[in-house]
Amino acid sequence: MLATLVDAPFDDDEWLFEIKWDGVRAIAGIEKGKPPRIHSRTGKDLLVQFPELARLDRRYTRTPVLVDGEIVSLDAAGRSSFQRLQSRLNRRTSDPHLERTIPATYVVFDLLYAGGADLRRRPLEERKALLERILRPGPHVMYSKHVLGKGKQLYALAKRKSLEGIVAKRRDSPYVERRSQLWRKIKTHHEQEFVIGGWTEPRGSREEFGALLLGVYEHGKLVYVGHVGTGFDRTTLAQVMKRMRPLETKPCPFATVPASNAKNHWIRPKLVAEVKFGEWTVDGLLRQPVFLGLRDDKDPRDVVRERPSL
């Protein structure tokens, strides 16, 4: 179930409000005495990248269960950051040093199945109450708490703490497996996914590439929305180029070839980048974009320009 972007926080006693966690969305199937099955939205097995989650079965008093949540990296103040989680992603082997220095936490916010019963048609508030009763928070797992009715207050706290935003959910909402107005997200800053359509040649002492060329899908066509050249260090530049190089192609993937002062290289539109930016210009381009990381949990064809619906 996905939330719809809206432009402002609100108060309403029919809604509950949670912090918007900034990580990798994950569904986990958990049975007693067995490693959990943890998958991203695209079906990728995440337990390989986050082996510290292998004993989630110890944290539930009732199994089997199917839960929904977000895998995050928390700082000392309890704030999540997708950018900090980057070094944990796309790994095929365990790295004890990273697991120790950047431990993962699975923040669980919904319960879809428990004790032989499908709970998706039950009201959200009922699902969350049962989840809180059967979950024993501990190392690498926590329950996503909420407040009732007071969305503006929680949003103000999220903004003061430099969090990504909040999510509003109708207390009586069923779990529907699509984007819905029953769940709404309100962000404290502009941030979303973009499809990478290519790169520009580097200049000066810059290595690998100068900037990534970004797009979103509109009416089935990839539309250019700007480029991002900040937010990279040497390691990130090399990692991103390693992913792009095998995808290089001669045809431009964008519906219209973007103008550029540097030589462009095109790639097949298979990679998705998370980008923070200041605002959209009147021409529909990104202003002050900053690269945060690659997203393997997002299907490029699902990437569209996010505009508030209300």
Image: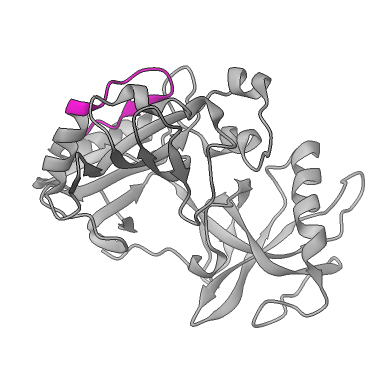
Look at the image and tell me whether residue 147 can be seen: no
> Coloring scheme of the render?
one colour
Q: Which region shows up in magenta?
A: 133-147
Q: Left or right? Give the position of 218 relative to 120.
A: right
Q: Picture quarter containing residue 147? A: top left
Q: Measuring 58% from the left and 23% from the top, which residue is drawn there?
A: 102
Residue 20 image position (x, y, % from top left): 36, 41
Q: How many marks?
A: 0
Residue 296 image position (x, y, % from top left): 58, 52
Instruction: Specify whether residue 277 is painted magenta.
Output: no
Compare residues 293 and 93 and report the one nearer the observer.
Answer: 93
Residue 211 image position (x, y, % from top left): 75, 56
Q: Left or right? Give the position of 284 relative to 2.
A: right
Q: Measuring 39% from the left and 65% from the top, which residue is drawn there?
A: 307
Q: Left or right? Give the position of 92 relative to 225.
A: right
Q: Left or right? Give the position of 224 relative to 54.
A: right
Q: Measuring 55% from the left and 32% from the top, which residue is drawn there?
A: 50
Question: In this view, which residue lies farthest toward the right?
Answer: 204
Q: Is residue 52 above or below residue 268?
A: above
Residue 310 image position (x, y, % from top left): 26, 63
